Amino acid sequence: MNTFLFDAIGMLGVFMILAVYSLVQLDKMDVKGLFYSIINAVGAVFILISLTVTFNMASFVIECAWLVISLFGIFQALKRARSNG
């Protein structure tokens, strides 16, 4: 199987997560914002997709945790948006 596509998807996920984290460190993005959590969740999913070809347990565990935490962040951001109205 050609792993290039899966590697590219995984690298895109890594880039997404690192990009939003960099923006947070530069005070250009709010960690409580919906966009931050969505990009983190999508990035984690992309990395998990890449792991279906070249599996690594440690990477799998951290990305599952990253995804769950990001989904919680999405829920919290939506909840805040509804309460602010």
Image (cartoon, helix red, strand yellow):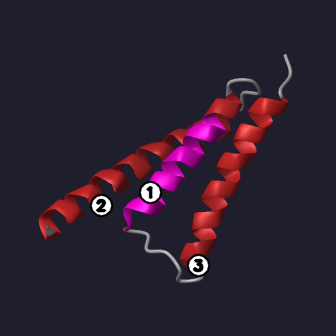
Residue 42 vertical position relative to residue 51 in the rendered view, above or below: below
How many angstroms separate mark 1 from mark 3 (CA)? 15 Å
Residue beneath disc 1? 37
Residue 45 in the image: state x and y as whole percent.
Answer: 56, 39
Residue 38 is covered by the magenta coloring: yes
Residue beneath disc 2? 77
Q: Quadrant of the C terminus?
A: bottom left
Residue beneath disc 3? 25
Seen at 36% across and 56% down, the residue is 73
Q: Is mark 3 on a helix, strand or loop?
A: helix
Residue 57 in the image: state x and y as whole percent.
Answer: 66, 32
Residue 2 vertical position relative to residue 77 in the rendered view, above or below: above
Magenta region, main secondary structure? helix
- Please give left or right for residue 30 compared with residue 16 in the image: left
Badge nearest the viewer, 3 or 2: 2
Marking on residue 4:
none
Q: Earlier in the sequence, mark 1 or mark 2?
A: 1
Q: Is mark 2 on a helix, strand or loop?
A: helix
Marks 1 & 2, CB-CB < 8 Å contact: yes
Q: What residue type is labelled 3?
A: Gln
* Image: magenta residue range: 33-48
Judge the density around disc 3: few (<14), some (14-19), many (≥20) Cα neighbours within 10 Å.
few
How many angstroms separate mark 1 from mark 2 (CA)? 8 Å
